[in-house]
Amino acid sequence: MGVFNAINETSNKAIDHGESYVKSSQEYYKLKVFQQLTKSFSFLSKLAIIGSLLFLGLIFLTVAGAIWLGEIVGSTPLACIIMAASLFLCTIIAYLTRKEIDKNIIKKISKEFFD
């Protein structure tokens, strides 16, 4: 009977250790998910704030550049067309390099996510 009691006691300890491991792992993954969610939310919040301010600055800079260019060229409509063409050119360049942009974003986010 002593052997059976020893086996029973050992198996009970193994079960206890297994349950403790599962609980610890569950808590770790909860904290890891919370960390990733807060980092993502923080990143998106900063992106929205900085992006909107940058967009407003770009609008004012474009309008000011069109007015200035209109004075140089002597025609405000022509200056607006030149500014629009330059913005379209920038858009086309960004479109052509979109895969490179995606690769850089994935690399940076994967470092944060899998760290």
Image: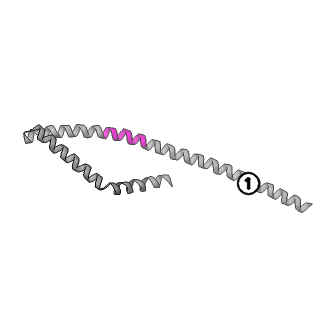
Tell me the quarter of the picture where residue 68 sits: top left
Residue drawn at the location 35% of the way across and 56% of the way down: 99
**In this rendering, is residue 76 above or below 86?**
above
Q: x and y percent of residue 103 in the render?
A: 38, 57
Tell me the quarter of the picture where residue 6 sits: bottom right
Give the residue at the far right of this rendering: 1
Q: x and y percent of residue 100 in the render?
A: 34, 57
- How is the protein colored in the picture? one colour
Q: x and y percent of residue 67 in the render?
A: 14, 37
Horizontal relation, residue 17 to residue 100: left or right: right
- Quick check: is 47 in the magenta stretch? yes
Point out the stretch of residues depicted in magenta. Answer: 44-54
Tag 1, which secondary structure? helix
- Quick check: is 22 in the magenta stretch? no
Give the residue at the far left of this rendering: 74
- Residue type at the position of mark 1: His
Tell me the residue that label 1 is attached to: 17
Total residue callouts: 1
Residue drawn at the location 76% of the way across and 57% of the way down: 14
Residue drawn at the location 80% of the way across and 57% of the way down: 11
